[in-house]
């Protein structure tokens, strides 16, 4: 079964300009995803998909293949499913075909080749080759989330009896979806929605030992830099 890693890296980030190539601990952000995929024994090939030739040149320097996408697929309204479908069209034009696509968004730099092997093994075994998506414990439980109307009145987002569920010790387990892990069968892309999931999707729980960071703001970059320093010094262990 052939597996290709796709690293989507558009150039139009608003909160952090050029986020995907911004240097983190001495390397461009997207290089962490490339390195983890190249060093994963279950990944056959690695590609960067971007609307920027400059981004693709950086990806090439770190060993990735290049897929230049249309600017129409690099806007704030673009969704990942469309990017993946465009990538498959590109591959078919190169007479290259794969069974599995593992999508590695660069905003999750703390993700090693060992992590990828665990994700892919879960996809191949426990998930029965169903689309896989990452799950993490949310920082805020849905039972603590409220809506506020125009008059300032509030109501729970989840319809619950607040006289019963007032202690978090009895809350049911919920997960937050994250693309830290995302694996899809190439033949089933059309079944997915814009969030890369479908009713048959399999949830992969991110190991608690992995320091989770999703880089979206300048503060996230600072936090990731702090974590990288701790990992590099051996004060944080990220092996499984």
Image (cartoon, grey):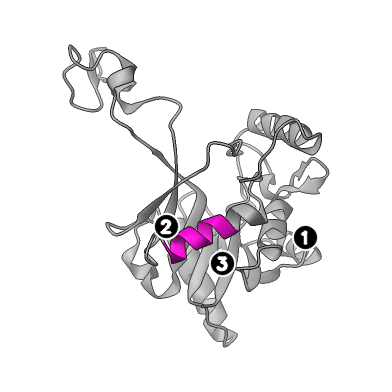
Estimate how packed mark 2 is, as few (under 14), some (14 to 19) or many (20 or more) residues with alpha carbons within 10 Å.
many
* Residue located 66% across and 62% down the image: 37
Residue 6: percent from left, percent from top? 58, 64
Q: Which residue is mark 3?
A: 70
Q: Are marks 1 and 3 in contact (CB under 8 Å)?
A: no
Instruction: Read off the magenta span.
Output: 117-125
- Report the Cα–Cα distance between label 1 and label 3: 18 Å
Q: Quadrant of residue 59?
A: bottom right
Mark found first going from the N terminus, 2 or 3: 3
Q: Is residue 59 left or right of residue 172?
A: right
Res 58 label: 1
Q: Position of residue 138 (x, y in %)?
A: 43, 31
Which secondary structure, mark 2? strand
Q: Answer with left or right where residue 141 lies relative to residue 67.
A: left
Q: Secondary structure at mark 3?
A: loop
Tell whether position 118 is magenta: yes
| Residue of label 2 | 132
Q: CA distance from mark 2 to mark 3?
A: 27 Å
């Amino acid at each position: 079964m052939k597996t290709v890693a796709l690293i989507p890296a558009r150039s139009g980030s608003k909160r952090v300009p050029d986020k995907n190539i911004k240097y983190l601990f001495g390397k461009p952000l997207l290089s962490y995803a490339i390195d983890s995929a190249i060093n994963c024994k279950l990944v056959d090939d690695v590609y960067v998909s971007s609307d920027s030739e400059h981004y693709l040149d950086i990806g090439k320097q770190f060993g990735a293949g290049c897929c230049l996408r249309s600017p129409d697929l690099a806007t704030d309204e673009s969704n990942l499913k469309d990017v993946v479908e465009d990538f498959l069209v590109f591959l078919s034009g190169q007479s290259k075909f794969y069974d599995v696509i593992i999508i590695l968004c660069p905003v999750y730099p703390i993700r090693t080749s060992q992590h990828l092997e665990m994700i892919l093994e879960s996809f191949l075994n426990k998930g029965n080759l169903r689309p896989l998506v990452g799950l993490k414990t949310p920082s805020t439980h849905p039972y603590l989330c409220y809506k506020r109307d125009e008059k300032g009145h509030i109501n729970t987002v989840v319809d619950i009896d607040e006289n019963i569920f007032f202690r978090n010790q009895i809350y049911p387990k919920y997960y937050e979806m994250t693309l830290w892990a995302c694996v899809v069968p190439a033949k089933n892309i059309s079944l997915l929605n814009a969030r890369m999931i479908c009713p048959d999707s399999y949830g992969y729980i991110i190991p608690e030992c992995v320091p989770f960071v999703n880089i979206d703001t300048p503060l996230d970059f600072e936090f990731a830099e702090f974590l990288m320093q701790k990992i590099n010094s051996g004060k944080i262990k990220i092996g499984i």
